[in-house]
Amino acid sequence: MAALRRLTQSRRSTDDRTALAGEAAADAAEGRLAPDGTGAPAGPNGPGAPEGDHTPVPGDVRAAAFFDCDNTILRGAAIFYLGVGLYRRRFFSRRDLARFAWQQAAFRLRGAENPDHIADARDSALGLVAGKRTADLEQICEEIFEPVLAEKVWPGTRALVQMHLDAGQRVWLVTAAPQEVARLIARRLGMTGALGTVAETRDGEYTGRLVGGMLHGPAKAAAVQALARREQLDLARCAAFSDSANDIPMLSLVGHPYVINPDGALRRHARAMGWRVRDFRTGRKAARIGVPAAAGLGVLAGAAAAAVAVHRRQRA
């Protein structure tokens, strides 16, 4: 009986954190992101939206589209690109990176997303930014993602984003990446706004804690639901796009789920559910860039993998 009570309390606590993460992301997204004049990323625009896709209804004010980021819009993981850029700019000490890299290596050997191990990875990553100024990170994000967005955006997905924008619908980025990164990517793509992981700040500095938790899996669905309530959206008229089985909760919320460059589990689920699948990768299955799922469970988890790679090249 005691074990059941503890399990129930643990589930309630997880549900509370998930809901809080979703509400925090919706709070942060309330201010809409007008295009800043830079336009779409440089590079080929690619083809228009693939034939056979659901055509958004022009002017439907209760419809919107929600796009995952990693491997859906970007080739690879935003957190990885952020980690590489921060390491190169000496945002962290070698000692911090070595400690975090050791934890991530241990996680790789375990090979499972144990909640305690995920919490350790998250807390270690957040510890790396505690006391850092938010303005400094935002400026560095601008520098890091300018070339990334020019080179790493999938043209096919970019066309789908534009299709919804051209129909006058609101388009939101939904990602586990930090809100600062999510906001920047959304602005560069001309999107309405972004839902991302919210890190707690005080007096312009990071405290080393998240508000609720990471925007991952069920938390993404909670954020979309929270935003839909505020924006008076009808989710049955909305569309969502993702590559990962982790986003099945979000995809299941909307009337028009799309699977983009899917992993194996999501492809199987999509086939069973009759969801549309679009794969913009060519030839062999595209390899994912970056760190394992749990390594993304912090604001700067990608930094560890980047540091290890750079260090190995330097030794070689």
Image (tube, rainbow, N blue to C red):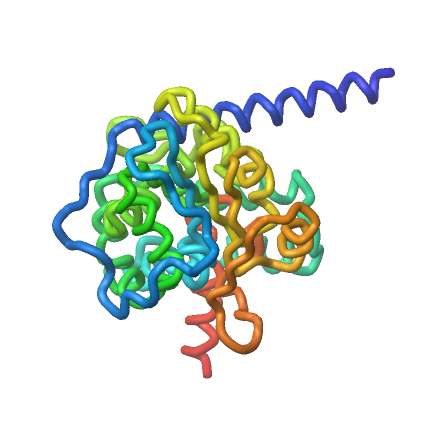
Horizontally, residue 273 falls left or right of residue 309, namely right
Q: Residue at x 44, y 44 (%)?
A: 175
Q: Is residue 33 visible?
A: yes
Work out whether residue 308 or residue 227 is closer to the camera in this orientation and state it: 227
Looking at the image, the residue that sits furthest to the right is: 1
Q: Residue at x 23, y 38 (%)?
A: 33
Q: Residue at x 87, y 16 (%)?
A: 1
Horizontally, residue 78 falls left or right of residue 180, namely right
Can you tell which quarter of the image residue 63 is in? top left
Does 32 appear above or below 286?
above
Looking at the image, the residue that sits furthest to the left is: 37
Q: Position of residue 108 (x, y in %)?
A: 64, 59
Work out whether residue 74 or residue 255 is closer to the camera in this orientation and state it: 255
Q: Is residue 123 visible?
A: no
Work out whether residue 266 or residue 107 is closer to the camera in this orientation and state it: 266
Q: Position of residue 186 (x, y in %)?
A: 30, 46
Q: Number of numbered discs present? A: 0
Q: Residue at x 30, y 58 (%)?
A: 90
Q: Position of residue 206 (x, y in %)?
A: 34, 35
Does 136 appear above or below 2?
below
Q: Position of residue 19 (x, y in %)?
A: 52, 24
Can you tell which quarter of the image residue 202 is in? top left
